[in-house]
Image (tube, helix red, strand yellow):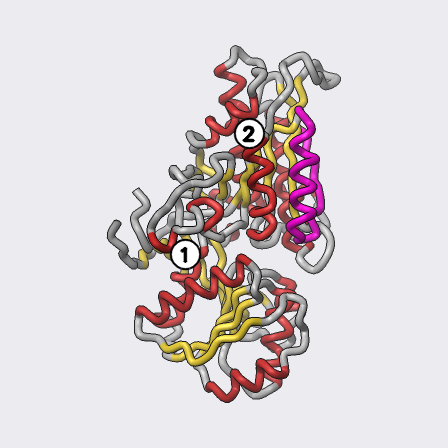
Amino acid sequence: MRHRSLLILTTAVTTGALTLSACGSRGDDNKSGEGKSTVVIGLDAPTTGELSALGLGIRNSAQLAIDNANKAGEVKGVSFKLEALDDKALPNVGQQNATKLAADKNVLGVVGPLNSGVAQSMQQVSKQNDLTLISPANTTPDLTQGKDWKQNKRVRPFPTYFRTATTDEVQGAFDGQYAWEKMKAKKAYVIDDQKTYGVGLASSFKDQFGKLGGKIVGTEHVSPDDRDFKAVVSKVKSAKPDLVFYGGEYPASGPLSQQLKDGGVTVPLMGGDGMYSADYIKLNKKAQGDYASSVGKPVEELPSAKKFIAGYKAAGFKEAYEAYGGSTYDATWALIQAVKQVVQDNDGKLPDDARKKVVDAMNKVTFDGVTGPIAFDKYGDTTNTMITAYQVDKGAWASRFSAEFKKFDKS
């Protein structure tokens, strides 16, 4: 298939979300007090630890979608309940959570996880149990298109897996093109945290930046647990780049950025959606001028998100919805719509093979969501490739540029 690179300014929106559908009980197996069948939607995210700011925003946004569905009677005869589990951003814990949720016959889907590495540990469990997994945040291409996607041998390995976030092939390429065309950077130093997400994002950035004429003046691999970057700072300073790109998440990139600037490296640090969090700025007194991309368009700029923002505020959640609030709401709503279709197709009751039917229904789900039009392609990827570049300005992330990035034709 022919490859192409194109940046298009547009008002379209995308989000990232991952849903897991599970087998449900028949209509009379698990009745609520109101005579309704109870469908459990699982959730897996890091609600404790260094990435909990993002995880709690995911949990709260899923809860809001479920509360709204119940209040509106979205699925006749069905009451939804959220079962949220903490994966601590650890793959083995995510796998344990997936196994636990799959064992509950009332679970008809799982929203999450946040981390691509955690998703890899959950996918086989979801496939074996016909349980839909839909993430608002996973971006590693392998999850939907297989390990040979770089050779354009794209095969969907897990038919139960979906996401409302676009991939790092798209996001990293967007970052590389933004750095070259908008930031006018000619030389970049690239660092990754050796995790699935970070390595993939950094690789995609390098490929696109290099294709456009940019020079990679150095690369480095660090541990996601590192907080002392003196050796890295020395190498970066000697390379004299126009930009430092980091593939990883904010707990490490915040201290890295500050230490780079303290060490005399005055150029911006740039990263992906794993860096786009208010906590990045809290961890970095010298974050001013740094960049991060994130999937979709800022919900604050979307008319379609007004009700979500107002509803989130009215619900009184203590934590912010953060980067994936809108995409999580849409991921949860996609799962609810799939359940709705399955119930309607079975004369208003949940069938015995509800999990499998929910997976099938997910492939056909379409609706106008918080973040824009929601639909999935044949790989389970979102059909919208909108990315936004943000820059830290006066202690907050400010959106600078939004575009759809179409790097290849997957048809």
The residue wearing badge 1 is 169
Q: Is residue 38 above or below residue 170?
A: above
> For the residue labelled by badge 1, is the local secondary structure a helix, a strand or a loop?
helix
Point 52% across, 83% down: residue: 236
**Mark 1 and 2 residues: CB-CB less than 8 Å, in contact?**
no
The residue wearing badge 2 is 130
Q: Is residue 348 above or below residue 375?
A: above
Q: Is residue 57 above or below residue 183?
A: above
Name the mark nearer the viewer: 1 or 2: 2
Residue 409 percent across, percent down from the top left:
29, 48
> For the residue labelled by badge 2, is the local secondary structure a helix, a strand or a loop?
loop
Neighbour tally class for label 1: few under 14, some 14-19, many 20 plus, Cα within 10 Å? many
Residue 398 percent across, percent down from the top left:
51, 64
- Quarter of the image for the C terminus: give it: top left
Point 62% across, 68% down: residue: 223
Query: Is residue 176 at all visible to an observer of this figure?
Result: yes
Does label 1 or label 2 sit earlier along the sequence?
A: 2
Point 27% across, 55% down: residue: 3
Q: In this view, does 353 lie to the left or right of 159?
A: right
Image quarter of residue 184 = bottom left
Residue 82 percent across, percent down from the top left:
68, 34
Q: Is residue 178 left or right of residue 353?
A: left
Neighbour tally class for label 2: few under 14, some 14-19, many 20 plus, Cα within 10 Å? many
Image quarter of residue 377 = top left
Q: Which of 20 and 257 is in front in this view?
A: 20
Question: Which residue type does callout 2 highlight?
Answer: Asp
| CA gap, disc 1 and disc 2 | 27 Å
